[in-house]
Image (spheres, grey):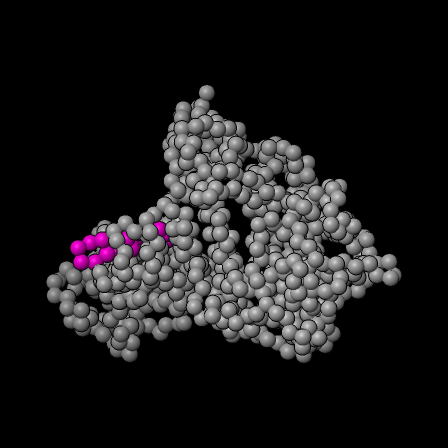
Amino acid sequence: MSKKKKQKGPGKMKSSLTHVIRKVFENNPESALTHKQVCTLIDLRENALRKLAFDVLQELSDRGELERHSHGVFSLAAQGSGIIGLIEVTARGAGFLVPEDGTEDVFIAPHNLGQALHGDRVKARIIKKGKGRAEGEIIEVLEREKTQFVGTIEMHEKFAFLIPDNVKAGTDIYISKEKLNGALHGDKALVRITVWPKSSDSPYGEVIEVLGKPGSNDTEMISILCNHGIDFKFPQEVLEEAETVGMDLEDEEIKKRRDFRKITTFTIDPVDAKDFDDALSVQKLENGRYEIGVHIADVSHYVRPGSAMDTEALKRSNSVYLVDRVIPMLPEQLSNMACSLRPNEDKYSFSAVFEMDEKGKIYNEWFGRTVIHSDRRFAYEEAQEIIEGKDGDYKTEILLLDGIAKTLRKDRLKQGALSIESEEMRFKLDESGHPVQVMIKTSKDAHKLIEEFMLLANKRIALFVGKAEKGKEAVPFVYRIHDKPEMAKIALFNVFIGKFGYELDFSHPDQIAQSINKLLEDIRLKNEYSLIQTMAIRSMAKATYDTTNIGHYGLAFDFYTHFTSPIRRYADLVVHRILQEKLTNGKHLYGKDLGDVCKRISRMERKATEAERESTKYFQTLFVQDHIGEEFEGTVSGIAEFGMFVKMDENQCEGMVPMNGIPGDRFYFDADKYRIIGAKTKKEYNFGDRVKVRIYEVHPRKRQIDLELIVD
């Protein structure tokens, strides 16, 4: 088995010599060396190699890496600080450096990656500039994104390699026999890199845990987590610290808080939820208005800055929701017990309390620490039945909240918010964890009720903390921001909907949200609704966390943050701490490091999303595995150079028909019109086309379903 892929071709010797000569000058930064001295230092004796060395010296001088003096003397040129950023490695082994200063990406050829791995924070230098993208070379790995990898053990006579599941890992890991810790050939294992000698093409590692044979759900889920740099176990010191957290509230602490325990309070969550972040309270006031409280688990009371739990929570940044399990941000003693707003238990909370009328107009608001007692836990389905007319507990309160929520949503859409109906693929699993049914969960009024009050709390707290008072600087804060969409992506979306016969006027950014909302409303009952909504979302910018506020385009809010889910999001925990400081002594807990926190939690949020999607794809393959050879109606849901994706109606799973597998002609991808077209017949396949397919092959480990197109 190869280690790191070797460069091939006639340029191999020159590339190696370039690397060696560069190292000679880096190790002798103050020295001026002649061609002869360089050859002596690296023991070059053959005339052909010595001539090649001179050519390399000339090239390094032309690039500006070496300074050329008279009489053929060279020295290391004065180097700047280099370019610092994150390295992204493609499946083919090339890299792209994304600079921290926001400048254009730098291409890194496979042989110039050095010891950098996907996601690492690195320093690079430019080695080639041109009209297109600059090319660089990694000169230092500043911070490893991850050092643990999951893969398959491949045994050799005196050693072994871990072949990582994730092709972006870029390298196999060498393991000596004494570091195998019981792992056998073919086992899935978790391996930690221990050292990477400069003289070695591959890092050295040791087996941390044998996961078993490939194919089990546990093994595959752990593989997904590790490949995305997500820990699936808590360190022992974190678990021990969590165990010291008790369930009982302290009288002295209760006295410091506003007491809501006698006010009607309840939660509305998914039927299988275990952690309850938020609760709502309702009471009618003497003036005829209502006091509505949005109560959030007070995680900040238990998780203090700098503690083991806090350090680990920042590292994870959020909980991860795979199909068959949750990987929590906090240990279960907090997430499911002490912090969870469970029914019939007194709990510490952090609250946003609003005096409102039935139309949602706010007359007064209050923020602060509270103690609550949830009287009832509702599943979304139970609350939905009450909204639809069925009798049930707290019917009056639920209908009041539903009415206000509908008004808030209507007003928000008038202000230009996007009207997106969330859709989530869920699986019903049997006792062995095998998927037996696919369900598409959509938002109903009960979901929107909770959503609107959470949005309200997040918006009002962002406004309270973020809006600078006269004569004072704004408090450093974590904003949830969403930039305006790029017009190029919107133009592409217009091409896409044109395949269905729709066309919208997107000539001005202010028209985009309203135009998309009208389109989605008009086609809500049509087959293409889900596909067009998905593409509309993809055409938008990605929401992220930042200390600089630019507003939230999708919600049409000038100020927005995340306050309502501190059990599962580190951003919310930080917001609680900042809010508490503003309410009490006005001190700033965070300074410039808050920007680094935002970058971290944004990056980990993306990783969690990617892991969750991969988990769903894996369970899709398990679900259709028993249907190989069967035919299904479907819709073309994606088009690319290598083929087209088809979403099957009956099971909602997506597979791919390879380009060379489309019968009847030699088909190719027309990038200008985003279609697949036959070279001779001019037969077209477009987004949204109705087709019939046969499941040809299923690859759970690749998370891939291969389809055959059936042409009548």
Camera-side residue: 677 or 317? 317
Camera-side residue: 630 or 250? 250
Side (left or right) of 510 relative to 533: right
Q: Position of residue 460 (x, y in %)?
A: 71, 62
Q: Is residue 152 magenta?
A: yes
Q: Residue furthest right?
A: 287
Camera-side residue: 42 or 422? 422
Q: How many numbered markers are drawn?
A: 0
Q: Position of residue 375 (x, y in %)?
A: 70, 57
Q: Is residue 594 magenta?
A: no
Q: Kindly tell me whether residue 426 is visible in this rendering.
A: yes
Q: Kindly tell me whether residue 617 is visible in this rendering.
A: no
Q: Residue at x 40, y 72 (%)?
A: 80
Q: Position of residue 546 (x, y in %)?
A: 58, 64
Which stretch did the figure color magenta? 151-170
Q: Residue at x 46, y 43 (%)?
A: 431
Q: Position of residue 505 (x, y in %)?
A: 66, 41
Q: Residue furthest top?
A: 712
Side (left or right) of 120 relative to 552: left
Tell me: residue 217, above or below residue 314.
above
Tell me: residue 580, above or below residue 352.
below
Q: Residue 710: name its quadrant.
A: top left
Tell me: residue 434, above or below residue 365.
above
Camera-side residue: 575 or 671? 575
Side (left or right) of 382 relative to 148: right
Q: Residue at x 34, y 47 (%)?
A: 214
Q: Residue at x 31, y 66 (%)?
A: 194
Side (left or right) of 266 relative to 360: left
Q: Residue 491: name its quadrant.
A: top right
